[in-house]
Image (spheres, rainbow, N blue to C red):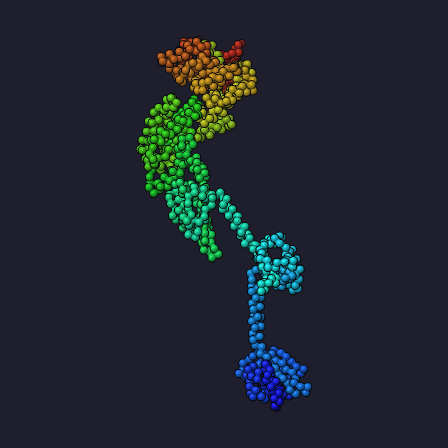
């Protein structure tokens, strides 16, 4: 079909592509010029083409098959298939040309560029949305009126927005929810609706939330072409950073104020920082840049491997620590305890190391003093038993391989107590120091001199046989015989030495000292001032002595001891004037024990005090019994030096007399001269106190000590007993006779009674009578007998009217005869 020129001109003049279609057949009846560039079909090619040649999909073909789709006209976006097969986006319009709807006009506008721009815009918006959602911070965008335009999921998470506020937007509720979680902030959650300057610069503030979380809020204006259109808020959770910052500030304060020195080194060990305490420890020594290990040294010298040692500990997740010396700027050094730790990054790589230095100078000094006290004698400075033990143990261990012998000497000063008692303990301590100096000068460097305690010393002689030990002991004895001088006073100190050999006499230090002590004790028994090796039989004697001492300490409680009484007789009348109380011990297993065996043992062990107290109590009680039965006789009790020196002796004596109701004149105390000569002033005071009680004082064993005789005229002595050693030679020994005569003459001149001890023969008794002696005591009259037997004799003999003596039967020569009942 052909249209008129006018219509054709009009269609060809349009800018948009136009195809005229037959409404019944949908064939192209005319195509204008503009459609050529869009569809690729020339008007001739388009002529009689069905419209579905433009369809790019089945949906489009379905559109043309249903005429109801375009009745009344239609307009839509679609794609058409061009003549070359390519697709192009167009905006299509379909409408009837006339009222009869015979012709349809299909208009097509090219929309490909527009759609391309819109696609890019959509993509850009999607990217912006994705960027917003991917942000690590919570983002909130507000408009000019403060209304919420957008926020991301991170924002919802940070503020823990409930589901209801995410489904249905309520700006006021969201801000109220945020405000309710906030403890404090520098500003309110303003919506900026009252803010005049919407281009305010960036702001920042910290929000403290309930629950301990900390948020940082930053805001910037949202600008469009330089004009503020709203504000963007970003929220960041800085809880961890805040804690870390707090910790860093705290660490910095600790670093600066720590009393310990602290250094920080880099990954290579070079020092990069030192705190003030560390600077003080170093005495301001410049150390920055120096290798940390060069600051220290050990007792043995430099510690160049310190870093390797520390790294080995760091590799197992630990730290290195130990005692070192810190080198200071002035060439000095101080003791420090170093703790060195490593700092690593997230990949485990060493970043830095920190050293903590504690000043151990005072502790080190204290430790040295403690060790000095622990291993050295405080008085002499010599090694003590503990130090000797360590040294000897080393020698014993080495001897397992070398078979090297050594000797132990045990040295005890003889009668050293006399020096302490007479000159005082301070003087005695100074003597011990001099002894230590003398002994040290006699030893080799490998030998060890140890003060065991008191006046006892132990010597370790390295690689020393018995012959060598004997030589050393000889030199010691010779040196000790040389005079000592202190405060202008000259004196000598004698010693006794016992020796033991390793390994013959023992395999441990304790065994060797014990054996040497036994040998030394044997020297003491044999007169002191000598030297002896240990012999196995010595232990047997010591064991017997220990058994004897143990039995002695149990004898009183078991009733194995008793007090016997030996009469003292007036020679011319035969009357008993007194009785000496003598302790006797009969053991069920050991039999009768001689006083000469157990009394010295009691004196050495100190048990003599208990024995003396018991004998005194028993004797006074028995004398009170004699008095009560009408046969009063004075009882004479021996008092040891140790008992007499007890501070409460006079008080106990008074108590014993009072409790037994015995008048004091019926009691005598026998003392040796040595008691009165030691601490003379104190002893004289005590003697006068006893005399004031009315108790008689007797000098026993007169003439055997180093008598001064001056005490005889100063002290209230009532009786002197002539020692039996002078009586034994009578009547034939001229010397004994002269001594006894002199003692009797002196006693009579002083008005003191004299009793001859140990009279066993008639001839001795007669000799004493000829020398003007009045009393005797001994086996000639009677040995010491039990209390019951002595009491019976008193009853049989009867008492004189004067009640001051009991008679024995006299012979024609005036001396008392032995009485069978008192044997």
Residue at horizontal 38 percent and vertical 38 percent from the top: 391
Residue 219, percent from left and from top: 59, 58
Q: Residue at x 48, y 21 (%)?
A: 644
Position of residue 446 in the picture relative to residue 673 (left or right): left
Q: Where in the figure is residue 23, as x and y percent of width and height?
A: 64, 87
The answer to which of 41 and 133 lies nearer the viewer is 41
- Name which quarter of the figure residue 420 lies in: top left
Number of marks drawn: 0
- What residue do we see at 46% from left, 14% from top? 715
Q: In the displayed structure, would residue 168 be above or below residue 386?
A: below
Q: Is residue 387 left or right of residue 633?
A: left
Any part of residue 361 in sight = yes
- Seen in the picture, residue 599 relative to 290 is either above or below; the reply is above
Residue 224 image-quadrant placement: bottom right
User: Residue 283 or 469: which is nearer the viewer?
Assistant: 283
Above or below, comparing residue 99 to residue 681 in the picture: below
Q: Nearer the viewer, residue 144 or 239?
A: 144
Image coordinates for residue 3, horizontal then vertical, percent: 62, 89
Quarter placement of the N terminus: bottom right
Asked whether 211 or 480 is in front, the reply is 211
**Residue at the bottom extreme?**
1
Left or right: residue 144 versus residue 317 is right
Side of 695 relative to 328 (left or right): right
Q: Position of residue 264 (x, y in %)?
A: 45, 49
- Residue 818 seen from this side: no
For the point 47% across and 52% down, which residue is it?
Answer: 343
């Amino acid at each position: 079909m052909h249209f008129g020129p006018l219509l054709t001109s009009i269609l060809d003049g349009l800018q948009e592509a136009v195809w005229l279609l037959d409404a019944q057949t949908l064939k192209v009846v005319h195509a204008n010029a503009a459609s050529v560039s869009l569809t690729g079909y020339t008007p001739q090619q388009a002529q009689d083409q069905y419209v579905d040649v433009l369809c790019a999909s089945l949906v489009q073909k379905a559109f043309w098959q249903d005429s109801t789709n375009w009745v009344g006209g239609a307009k839509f976006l679609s794609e058409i298939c061009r003549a070359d097969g390519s697709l192009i986006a167009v905006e299509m319009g379909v409408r009837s040309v006339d009222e009869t709807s015979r012709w349809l006009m299909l208009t097509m506008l090219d929309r490909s560029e527009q759609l391309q721009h819109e696609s890019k815009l959509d993509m850009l918006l999607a990217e912006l949305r994705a960027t917003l959602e991917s942000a690590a911070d919570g983002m909130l965008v507000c408009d000019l009126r403060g209304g919420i335009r957008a926020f991301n999921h991170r924002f919802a998470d940070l503020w823990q927005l409930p589901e209801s506020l995410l489904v249905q937007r309520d700006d006021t509720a969201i801000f109220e929810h945020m405000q309710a979680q906030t403890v404090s902030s520098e500003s309110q959650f303003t919506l900026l609706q009252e803010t005049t300057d919407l281009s305010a610069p960036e702001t920042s503030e910290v929000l403290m939330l309930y629950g301990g979380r900390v948020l940082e809020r930053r805001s910037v204006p949202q600008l469009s072409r330089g004009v503020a259109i709203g504000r963007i808020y970003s929220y960041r959770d800085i809880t961890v950073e805040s804690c870390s910052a707090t910790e860093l500030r705290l660490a910095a304060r600790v670093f600066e104020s720590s009393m310990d020195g602290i250094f920080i080194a880099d990954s290579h060990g070079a020092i990069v920082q030192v705190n003030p305490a560390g600077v003080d420890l170093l005495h301001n020594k410049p150390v920055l840049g120096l290798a940390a290990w060069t600051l220290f040294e050990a007792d043995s010298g430099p510690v160049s491997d310190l870093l390797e040692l520390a790294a080995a500990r760091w590799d197992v997740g630990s730290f290195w620590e130990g005692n070192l010396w810190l080198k200071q700027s002035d060439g000095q050094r101080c003791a420090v305890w170093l703790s060195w730790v490593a700092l690593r990054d997230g990949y485990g790589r060493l970043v830095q190391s920190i050293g903590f230095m504690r000043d151990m100078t005072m502790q080190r000094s204290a430790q040295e003093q403690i060790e000095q006290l622990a291993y050295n004698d405080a008085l002499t400075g010599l090694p003590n038993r503990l130090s000797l033990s360590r040294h000897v143990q080393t020698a014993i261990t080495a001897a397992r391989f070398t078979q090297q012998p050594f000797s132990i000497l045990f040295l005890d000063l003889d009668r050293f107590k006399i020096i302490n008692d007479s000159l005082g303990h301070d003087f005695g301590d100074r003597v011990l120091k001099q002894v230590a100096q003398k002994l040290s000068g006699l030893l080799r460097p490998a030998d060890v001199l140890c003060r065991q305690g008191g006046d006892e010393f132990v010597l370790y002689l390295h690689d020393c046989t018995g012959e060598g030990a004997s030589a050393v002991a000889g030199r010691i004895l010779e040196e000790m015989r040389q005079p000592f001088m202190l405060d202008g006073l000259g004196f000598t100190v004698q010693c006794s030495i016992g020796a033991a050999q390793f390994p013959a006499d023992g395999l441990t230090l304790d065994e060797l000292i014990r054996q040497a002590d036994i040998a030394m004790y044997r020297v003491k028994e044999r007169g002191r001032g000598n030297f002896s090796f240990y012999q196995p039989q010595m232990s047997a004697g010591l064991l017997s002595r220990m058994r004897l001492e143990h039995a002695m300490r149990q004898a009183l409680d078991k009733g194995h001891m008793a007090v016997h009484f030996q009469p003292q007789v007036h020679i011319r009348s035969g009357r008993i004037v007194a009785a000496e109380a003598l302790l006797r011990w009969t053991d069920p297993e050991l039999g009768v024990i001689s006083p000469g065996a157990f009394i010295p043992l009691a004196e050495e062990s100190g048990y003599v005090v208990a024995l003396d107290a018991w004998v005194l109590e028993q004797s006074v009680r028995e004398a009170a019994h004699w008095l009560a039965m009408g046969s009063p006789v004075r009882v004479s009790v021996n008092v040891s030096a140790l008992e007499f020196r007890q501070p409460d002796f006079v008080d106990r004596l008074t108590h014993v007399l009072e409790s037994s109701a015995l008048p004091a004149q019926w009691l005598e105390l026998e003392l040796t001269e040595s008691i009165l000569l030691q601490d003379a002033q104190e002893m004289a005071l005590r003697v006068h106190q006893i005399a004031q009680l009315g108790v008689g004082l007797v000098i026993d064993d007169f003439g055997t000590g180093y008598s001064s005789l001056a005490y005889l005229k100063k002290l209230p002595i009532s009786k002197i007993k002539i020692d039996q050693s002078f009586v034994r030679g009578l009547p034939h020994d001229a010397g004994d006779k002269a001594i006894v005569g002199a003692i009797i003459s002196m006693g009579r001149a002083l008005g003191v009674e004299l009793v001859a001890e140990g009279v066993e023969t008639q001839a001795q008794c007669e000799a004493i009578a000829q020398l003007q002696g009045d009393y005797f005591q001994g086996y000639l009259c009677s040995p010491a007998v039990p209390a019951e037997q002595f009491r019976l004799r008193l009853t049989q003999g009867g008492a004189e009217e004067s009640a001051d003596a009991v008679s024995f039967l006299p012979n024609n020569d005036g001396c008392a005869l032995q009485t069978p009942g008192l044997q």
